Image (tube, rainbow, N blue to C red):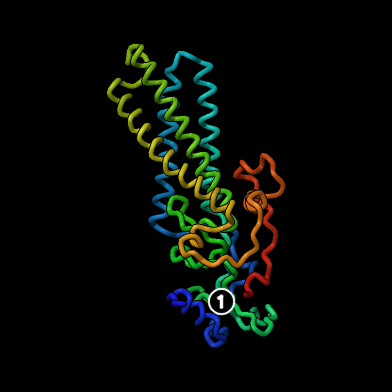
């Protein structure tokens, strides 16, 4: 069998001399660590800011260009409330996905004391990440942007300026879902507004001038269509990844499956929480994923 560079590197990681626990600086105590998780990446921060600005732009056009000038009061109120609720949930999901620890492995935990605490038996091995000096749990991968090993890392998303991993995948899935919903809602309202303006006088269907109204609506239509396609695809791939219990990186690298196979429903509950409830749709409800198993480091 041909040995790939990945397998060769993993074999090197198995050697006891490669761990070099004496060269690892012990991680800081939990009491000295802040609870805030934020990645200081210029590209990611810019993408996150742009995301919020695009949502605010859509809200501006929906409210001030289409709904406020409308003569149908009930239509305006219902759609205004619905759109803003979905937009709020989308931004709240984005906020949680961006500022939640995705499942980072303690940096520098490849110490002699920690390795001894694992009580390795003959034949058992552990893997060390040479970049962050950490003992890597099973299914963890190193992120070059976050500069940490992330448990069940799916990918690093610049739009949320964070990795999508074990602890924040729920928020990322909700973010893509709510963005897709407000994009579809905006497209439907733009279509109805164009029909209304064609039937009526353009000067009466908006508080802005007709050329400005057309430009604002076309820009919103382009934005909504683009993000509807993008987030729908991301939502579908994330749900498929959860149901199959295989992350994007594992699919890309075609890694051998070493973990127990579970039903799709069990996989969904592992990400969104136990049991099934309306909390699955809330970015404010933290799923109960249990404590990390110390033996997940051992292979």
Q: Is residue 292 above or below residue 276?
A: below
Q: Nearer the viewer, residue 101 or 142?
A: 142
What residue is rendered at 47% in x and 67% in y? 147
Farthest residue to the front: give it. Answer: 1
Taking the image as shown, residue 259 lies to the left or right of residue 54, namely: right
Quadrant hosting residue 110: bottom right
The picture places residue 223, in percent across and down from the top left corner, at 37, 37
Q: Residue furthest left?
A: 211
Residue 202: where, in percent of width, then height? 32, 15
Kindly state the secondary structure of the residue where label 1 is placed. Answer: strand
Judging depth in this view, the residue of 156 and 49 nearest the camera is 156
Q: Is 38 drawn above or below residue 235 in the view shown?
A: below
Say which residue label 1 marks.
127
Of residue 293 and residue 59, the one placed in the foreground of this image is 293
Circle 1 residues within 10 Å: few <14, some 14–19, many ≥20:
many
Which of the pair 140/85 is nearer the observer?
A: 140
Residue 155: x percent and y percent? 48, 58
Image height of 187 relative to 152, above or below: above
Label count reads 1
Which residue does the image show at 34% across and 22% down from the upper left?
208
Check the image and name the residue furthest to the top.
200
Q: Residue at x 33, y 30 (%)?
A: 218
Q: Quadrant of the C terminus?
A: bottom right
- The single residue placed furthest to the right in the displayed view is 275
- Locate residue 250 relative to residue 117 in the image: left or right: left
């Amino acid at each position: 069998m041909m040995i790939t560079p990945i397998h060769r590197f993993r074999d090197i990681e198995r050697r006891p001399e490669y761990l070099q626990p004496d060269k690892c600086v012990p991680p800081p105590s939990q009491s000295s660590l802040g609870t805030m998780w934020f990645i200081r990446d210029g590209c990611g921060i810019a993408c996150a800011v742009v995301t919020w600005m695009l949502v605010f732009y859509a809200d501006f056009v929906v409210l001030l260009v289409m709904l406020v000038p409308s003569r149908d009061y009930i239509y305006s109120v219902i759609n205004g409330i619905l759109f803003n609720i979905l937009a709020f949930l989308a931004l709240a999901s984005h906020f949680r996905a961006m500022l939640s620890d995705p499942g980072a492995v303690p940096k520098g935990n490849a110490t002699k004391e920690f390795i001894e605490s694992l009580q390795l038996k003959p034949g058992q091995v552990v893997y060390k990440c040479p970049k962050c000096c950490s003992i890597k749990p099973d299914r963890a991968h190193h992120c070059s942007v976050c500069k940490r090993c992330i448990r069940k890392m799916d990918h690093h998303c610049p739009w949320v300026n964070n990795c999508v991993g074990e602890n924040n995948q729920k928020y990322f899935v909700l973010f893509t879902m709510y963005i897709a919903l407000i994009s579809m809602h905006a497209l439907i309202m733009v279509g109805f507004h164009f029909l209304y303006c064609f039937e009526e006088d353009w000067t009466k269907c908006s508080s802005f001038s007709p050329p400005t109204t057309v430009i604002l609506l076309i820009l919103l239509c382009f934005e909504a269509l683009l993000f509807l396609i993008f987030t729908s695809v991301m939502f579908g791939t994330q749900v498929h990844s959860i149901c199959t219990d295989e992350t994007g990186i594992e699919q890309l690298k075609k890694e051998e499956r070493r973990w127990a196979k579970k039903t799709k429903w069990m996989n969904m509950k592992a990400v969104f929480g136990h049991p099934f409830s309306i909390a699955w749709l809330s970015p404010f409800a933290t799923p109960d994923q249990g404590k990390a198993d110390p033996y997940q480091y051992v292979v």
